[in-house]
């Protein structure tokens, strides 16, 4: 049985590691796992060590579809597999799993070693130009020649970070075989704002609550975020991005609660005390004990209270307005970052056309899809890579039978 795998990322390598028969992996780049290399800021958050009932709700699209492959190969099985092939792991806050070395290159080396120990041959610097089925065989044309396989696995990734090879080739191949592609949108990416926030660029906030209201929906996250030159990013913003990427963001709002641990009543007591103790100071100076200096002008501006008001001149109504602004500083959403800068592509090969147990096409026998090319995406925290590994394994086992 000759099996061809297009793509040498997480899903492709997992497929190669579990696939029986004569396996050839075709990779357009000069080395394996270029996108894996940059994930987790170079540390590679390869999965999340949670039970499936906790894991599955973090899948935004394709939760039901993923149940079969995740049940067969859950996070704990992946961790055991990595350990068996020599990779030491560690689990950090929130269940995030990383290589003990904090080097994504060690994850890639482990996957390549597992694939090659399984007999797979990896051919680099070879771009697939197209594929077709002739009789019972798949003929794959590349810039280096033509290959013929009995089974074909497409694991080409999405559209994010095209410099890593994610240029959408898999969608073209899928369409050529009659598959439907669910519209592609960015996920896990920064959010752009209409307001000028360049003065806040680089400001990192911890223990804040961010809420997006758009398209008749509302989503909130608590944790860390940061400001960019034209918007916001960071863990909770990326998570919100995964929730809102198919909403109509026109007229949408981003609300930031800088003090979510304080109730409005407790915050008002704090402000009353501060204004009393610093009654002769300007408002901006008083708030410096409560908020990062850079955000104070935005909070004051939205409260409507004069910036140079003294503590002893602030009325009760103004104090309430300030408290509301501290917990509800609002920005208008311009949109999400472009898809080429998104960590994950949302959309892809329609799941209704794929067998969830084997990843085999329901339209073309012997054709399989795995990883980000599918219409499956999840939140940040190792969930997307686990989905890639699980679907890759399922495809590899089924194709090699």
Image (cartoon, rainbow, N blue to C red):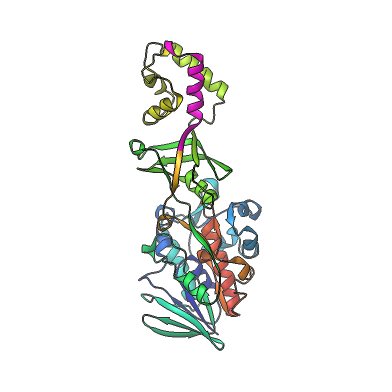
Is the stretch drawn in magenta largely helix, strand or loop?
A: helix
Q: Residue furthest left?
A: 199
Picture coordinates of residue 304, whole percent (x, y): 44, 23
355 vs 104, left or right, is: right
Query: Which quarter shows the C terminus?
Result: bottom right
Looking at the image, which residue is at 61% across and 64% down? 73
Residue 356 picture quarter:
bottom right
Residue at 41% over, 11% down: 279
- Quick check: 219 left or right of 161? right
Instruction: Indicate whether 77 appears above or below 257.
Output: below
Nearer the observer, 313 or 343: 313
Q: Say which of 145 and 254 sits in front.
A: 254
Q: Residue 360 in the image: state x and y as whole percent.
A: 60, 74
What's the magenta region? 312-331
**The N terminus sits in image quarter:** bottom right
Instruction: Indicate the position of residue 262 as horizontal and vertical percent values.
Output: 54, 26
Taking the magenta stretch, the answer to whether it contains residue 142 is: no
The answer to whether residue 123 is seen in the rendering is no
Is residue 60 toward the left or the right of residue 298 in the image? Answer: right
Kindly tell me whether residue 344 is visible in this rendering. yes
Judging depth in this view, the residue of 93 and 156 nearest the camera is: 156
| In-image side of 281 versus 7 (left or right) | left
Number of marks in the image?
A: 0
Q: Does residue 58 sit above or below 352 in this rendering?
A: above
* Quadrant of the rendered image containing residue 357: bottom right
């Amino acid at each position: 049985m000759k099996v061809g795998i297009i793509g040498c990322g997480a899903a492709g390598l997992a497929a190669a590691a579990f696939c029986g028969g004569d396996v050839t992996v075709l990779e357009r780049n000069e080395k394996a796992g270029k996108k894996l290399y940059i994930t987790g800021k170079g540390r590679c958050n390869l999965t999340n060590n949670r039970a499936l009932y906790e894991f599955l709700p973090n899948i935004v699209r394709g939760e039901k579809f993923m149940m079969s492959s995740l049940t067969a190969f859950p996070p704990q099985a992946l961790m055991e597999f990595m350990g068996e092939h020599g990779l030491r792991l560690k689990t950090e806050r929130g269940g995030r799993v990383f290589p003990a070395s904090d080097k994504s290159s060690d994850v890639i080396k482990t996957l390549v070693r597992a694939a090659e120990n399984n007999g797979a041959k990896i051919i680099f610097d070879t771009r697939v130009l197209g594929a077709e089925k002739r009789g019972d065989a798949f003929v794959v044309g590349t810039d280096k020649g033509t290959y013929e396989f009995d089974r074909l696995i497409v694991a080409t990734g999405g559209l994010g970070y095209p410099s890593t090879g994610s240029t959408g080739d898999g969608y073209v191949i899928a369409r050529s075989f009659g598959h439907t592609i669910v519209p592609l949108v960015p996920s896990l990416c920064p959010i752009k704002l209409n307001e000028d926030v360049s003065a806040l660029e680089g400001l990192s906030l911890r223990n804040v609550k961010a809420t997006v209201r758009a398209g008749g929906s509302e989503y909130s996250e608590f944790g860390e975020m940061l400001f960019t030159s034209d918007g916001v990013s960071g863990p909770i913003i990326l998570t919100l991005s995964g929730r809102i990427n198919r909403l109509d963001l026109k007229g949408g709002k981003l609300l930031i609660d800088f003090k979510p641990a304080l109730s409005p009543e407790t915050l008002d007591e704090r402000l009353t005390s501060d204004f009393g103790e610093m009654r002769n100071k300007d408002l901006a100076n008083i708030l410096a004990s409560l908020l990062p200096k850079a955000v104070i002008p935005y909070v004051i501006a939205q409260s409507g209270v004069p910036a140079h008001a003294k503590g002893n001149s602030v009325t009760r109504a103004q104090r309430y307005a300030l408290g509301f602004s501290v917990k509800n500083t609002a920005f208008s959403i311009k949109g999400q970052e472009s898809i080429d800068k998104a960590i994950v592509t949302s959309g892809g090969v329609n799941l209704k056309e794929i067998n969830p147990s084997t990843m085999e096409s329901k339209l073309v026998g012997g054709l399989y899809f795995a990883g980000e090319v599918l219409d499956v995406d999840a939140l940040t925290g190792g969930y997307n890579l686990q989905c890639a590994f699980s679907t890759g394994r399922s495809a590899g086992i089924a194709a090699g039978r």
